[in-house]
Every structure is written in structure tokens, then in C-alpha cells.
Image (cartoon, rainbow, N blue to C red):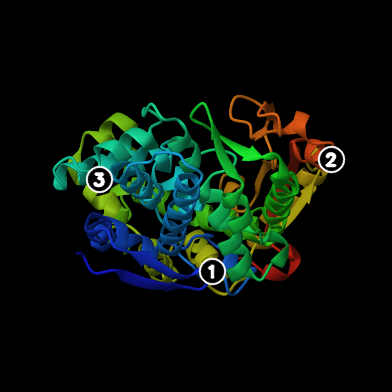
Amino acid sequence: MFPTKIINDPIYGFIKINNPLILQLIDHPYFQRLKRIKQLGLAEFVYPGAHHTRFHHALGAMHLMDQALNNLKAKGYLISEKEQEAAEIAILLHDIGHGPFSHVLEFTILNEIHHEQVSQLLMQKLNEHFDGQLSLAIEMFGDRYERKFFHQLISSQLDVDRLDYLSRDSFYTGVREGFIGSERLLSMLDLKNEQLVLEEKGIYSIENFLMARRLMYWQVYLHKTAIAAETMLIQILRRARDLMAKGIKLPVSKPLETFLTKTYTWDEFSQNPELLIAFTELDDHDIWAAIKGWKNEKDKILKHLCLQFLGRKLFTCKIGMQPIPKAKKTEIEEQIKSSLGISQEELSYFVVEGSTSNAAYVQGDNTIKMVDKQGQVVELMLASDLPTIQALSKIVKKYYFCCPKSVYLLGELS
């Protein structure tokens, strides 16, 4: 009998693990790296308590997967030990492909390569290491397993990933509006033709879940200060990359240098074992160490951006339903060039604009299904008489404009 490992989690209490393969995966360097990658990127600039990591989240999601499957088994559904192990492994490793600062630098370190692609690649490498024991987990992760509800628990609009990160992010940021009763939602899960459905009596719980998701996006994930910090970090790395392309040497860790000196395609990255090894050695600390070193560089733009970032003198960020008027943007740009003593070409490091959107619930093929008392499966929007859910399905798009704060007071760069 394998001894049970107990992990004390601030959200769920004791998480019990008695599977030797799962414990070996947790101890593997690929997974241990997640301890050094913040779950919420730069949200700590807004919420000082947001220091939790992808490691915390992965363990929590695995715990919820275990609860979900146990609840389904208690309702009489047959789920083998191998299937349960595979589903828990799949959700445990679902974020293993995240790079430094999670989503913030997803397309900066690796251009147009999603972390899910890297996760799948790393799972395949781990499968080789563990002699094929992850094959079923990989099938479930990639939605190739015949019992579709396993993938729905891993990735859908009502998956254990979302259930954990909402509660966990709410706890660590202190934004209580994001807290959800995951236990009740999990107890309401059912199956119909091997598809995941929710019992009709869970309609109000799902409304609370969707509302919490909408609020967390605007209050935490898309907070204007977090966006300002993220855009500033991206510009720092962009400037470093541009300087290195000109042959200028900068103090940087070897793994980070690998990805700043060249942009790789997916084919290049996936087929070069050395690149994958370099990526698995990257974490938040590489970025922080680089920024601390670059604040002393001769390049006035890189030096200034790093000093401002380290001192939390962030860009100001304006968010609205419409883009900033062109005339106003031109006026601001002229002020910035004059105040900082920079050229038109250098201006792009200090002015960033874009858009972001938020939809708590998206209609389409991946909708949440309810089962009524007659056993009929109904899509959530049709099952609910609540106008709130219809409103939450509306995609809200906002535009942001980031630039140095108090440009008249900054003075020229030196």
C-alpha cells in the first residue's frame, strides 16, 4: 500500500494523494518549475497578496477533478482507476507549458505559440520518460478519448480549471466577488450520453459562477494597472530584443538569451530538444534578474523603462468603449517626445494601444448543458429564465491606451 501524501491547501484544506505516478510527476523538474511562475502574472502590482503560483493552481485543479469523478461514481457511473488517474494527470499538467508570468509573455517569449501546445509537447516528453503511462491522459487532454466528459472536465466552460482559479484568485487577491461554491457545482454534475451536464437545480449556482467570472475579469485579470504593468514589461523585453539584434550584449540568463536573440516557429521549437530544455529552465526569476541588471545599461530607453518598472512608476492606462481619438493621441505623442527627448522611432516603446474583451459565457458548440426533471438536455440559455445569463453572454470590448504618467514631469532620459 502506497503511503498517502497530504498537502495543506488554503482553499480546500487537506489534499490527499496516494498515487505514486502522480507524486513522481509532481516531483519532476518540469512541474516543480511552476513554483516559480506566478498564476496572475503582474496582478501583485494591484493586489499585493497575489503571489500564488501555477503550482498551487495545478494541485487545486487536480483535487477538484478527484472530487468531480468521485461524485459521478457515487451516482452510479463506471469510472475505472486508470481513467481517474489519467484525468487527474491531464489536469495536473494542463498548465505545464506556461512560460514566465503566465499569459503576460505568452506571445513575447514564443511568438504565436500557445501554452497548450507546449503543455502537450512536455506531456509527450514525460510520457516517454514514464514508459507510456501518460498515454491515456494525453488522449483526454487532446479530446481524443471516446468518453468526452473527461475532456469537458479538463477544458470547457464549466471545467475544474476555471472552478479552481476563480476561487484561488479571489482568495489571494482579496476580491471576494470572485468566490464560488465549487463543492455545490461539482455535486450538481451529471452525465447524459457520456456528455457533461448540470442538474436543473444547479441553475442559480451556475449563474453565480458566471457572474463571478465576469467580475474577476474586469476587477483582476483586465485591471487597468495590471494592463499598464504588462505592456511596460513587454516593451522592456522588446527593447532588449531589438538591442541584442544589433549585436549589443546584455546581461541575461542563457535560457532567456536563447529566446531573445531569435524568434522560433512552432516547427523549429517542437523539433529541437535543446529549445525545449531551454524553455523548461525559464521562469519569472530570469525576467526579474534581467530587469535588475538592465537598469544599469547605457541604452537610455532600456534603462529608463527598467528603473520605472522596478520602482512601480508604471504607464498610465486609459480604458474606454472607444479608441482614443487620433488628434488626442497625436497631441500626447508630441508631449512624450518633447518631455522624454526621444525620436518618433523610439516613441513606440512608450505608447501602447490595443483592445481587450470579456465574455463570461460564450454560445456555440462548447455550451453548458442542463438536464431537466424529465431527463431532457437543454442548453443553459434556454433552461434559464434569468436575464442575467443572457447579459453575461454578451461580449464586451474595451480599448486601452498606455503611456508614461505625468509626461511633463519626467524630464529627458539620461
Q: Position of residue 343 (x, y in %)?
A: 60, 49
- Which amino acid is tagged 2? Leu
Three-letter code, disc 3: Leu
* Structural crowding at the residue carrying mark 3, measured as other residues with C-alpha within 10 Å and reported as few (<14), some (14–19) or many (≥20): some
Is the Cβ of the residue at disc 2 closer than 8 Å to that at disc 3?
no
- The front one of 129 and 258 is 129
Residue 76, image x and y in percent?
A: 47, 41
Residue 52 versus residue 48: which sits nearer the camera? 52
Q: Residue at x 54, y 38 (%)?
A: 156
- Say what secondary structure mark 3 lies in: helix
Identify residue for label 3: 276
Instruction: Nearest to the eye among marks 1 and 3: give it.
Output: 1
* Residue receiving disc 2: 386
Residue 24, horizontal then vertical, whole percent = 22, 59
In the shown orientation, is residue 124 left or right of residue 96? left
Indicate whether 220 appears above or below 352. Answer: below
Among the two numbered marks 1 and 3 on one chain, the one whose residue lies closer to the N terminus: 1
Residue beneath disc 1: 11
At which x and y percent is residue 58? Answer: 42, 57
* Residue 215 position by quadrant: bottom right
Residue 290 shows in this picture: yes
Quadrant including the C terminus: bottom right
Query: Camera-side residue: 304 or 94?
Result: 94
237 lies above or below 367: below
Residue nearest the viewer, comparing 147 with 217: 147
Q: The residue tagged with tag 1: helix, strand or loop?
A: loop
